[in-house]
Amino acid sequence: MTGIGKWVISPPRKTLVVGVADMIVSNDPSAELVTHSLGSCLGITVYDPAKRVGGLLHVMLPDSRTDPVKAASAPFMFVDTGVPRLFQAVYSLGAERRRLVTKVAGGAQPLDENGVFNIGERNHQALTGLLAHSGYVIYGQDIGGISSRTLRMDLTTGNVTIKTPGANTIFL
C-alpha cells in the first residue's frame, strides 16, 4: 500500500475465475479466487494460512463412475476425482495438511425444488463422506436452499465470502 496524505491506495487485486468443472490453485497473495453460478454444484476451497496457498474447485456431480470417459477428460467435474486433485495441487505449492482450512458452498436445488434428483444434496454427501474418510474437517459451509451462489476466497487472508442474489454477503 502507498500512503498519499490521508488516503491509502491498495494495489489492484487479481481475480482468478474458476469455471464450472474447473479448478485453480495459487500462492499469489494478491489474488482472489471466484466462482459463479453454484446451484447444485459445489464450490470447495482449501487454504493454508501459513503459506498463503489456496485453491478453489467447482464440481458438478458426485460420482465419476456415472461417466468414466467424461471423468478421464474432465476430472474436476466430479467430487470423487476433483477433490483429491485439489488437495494434491495445494500440496505441490507447499501447503501442509495439518494447516488446511476447507470451506464449501452450493449444493442447492435451484431447478429441483421437490428434490426429485437431489444432485446438490448428493454432491454434499459425496464430499463430506470423502473428506471424513480422509480425515479432513469442513470449517465453514453454506449448503442447500434453492438459490445459486457466488463464492470468493481472498488468498491474502483465506477469507471466504458467499453472495446469493437478493441476500446479504455471508462470511464463512
Image (cartoon, rainbow, N blue to C red):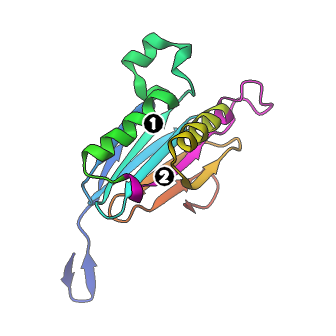
Q: Which residue is mark 1?
A: 83
Where are the magenta residues, as a range? Answer: 97-121
Nearer-N-terminus badge (1/2):
1
Magenta run includes residue 110: yes
Closest to the observer, 121 or 168: 121
How many discs mark residues in the rendered view?
A: 2
Q: Split into 4 quadrants, where in the image is the C terminus?
A: bottom right
Kind of residue at disc 1:
Val
Q: Which residue is mark 2?
A: 102
| Percent coordinates x, y for residue 125 in the rendering | 64, 36
Magenta run includes residue 111: yes
Q: Quadrant of the rendered structure where residue 47 is?
A: bottom left
Tags 1 and 2 touching, CB below 8 Å:
no
Q: Is residue 46 visible?
A: yes
Q: Residue at x 61, y 61 (%)?
A: 168
Within-10-Å neighbours for mark 2: few <14, some 14–19, many 20+ = many
Q: Is residue 82 left or right of residue 89?
A: right
| Percent coordinates x, y for residue 98 in the rendering | 40, 57
Q: Secondary structure at mark 1?
A: helix
Within-10-Å neighbours for mark 1: few <14, some 14–19, many 20+ = many
Q: Is residue 39 visible?
A: no
| Percent coordinates x, y for residue 1 in the rendering | 22, 75
Q: Secondary structure at mark 2?
A: strand
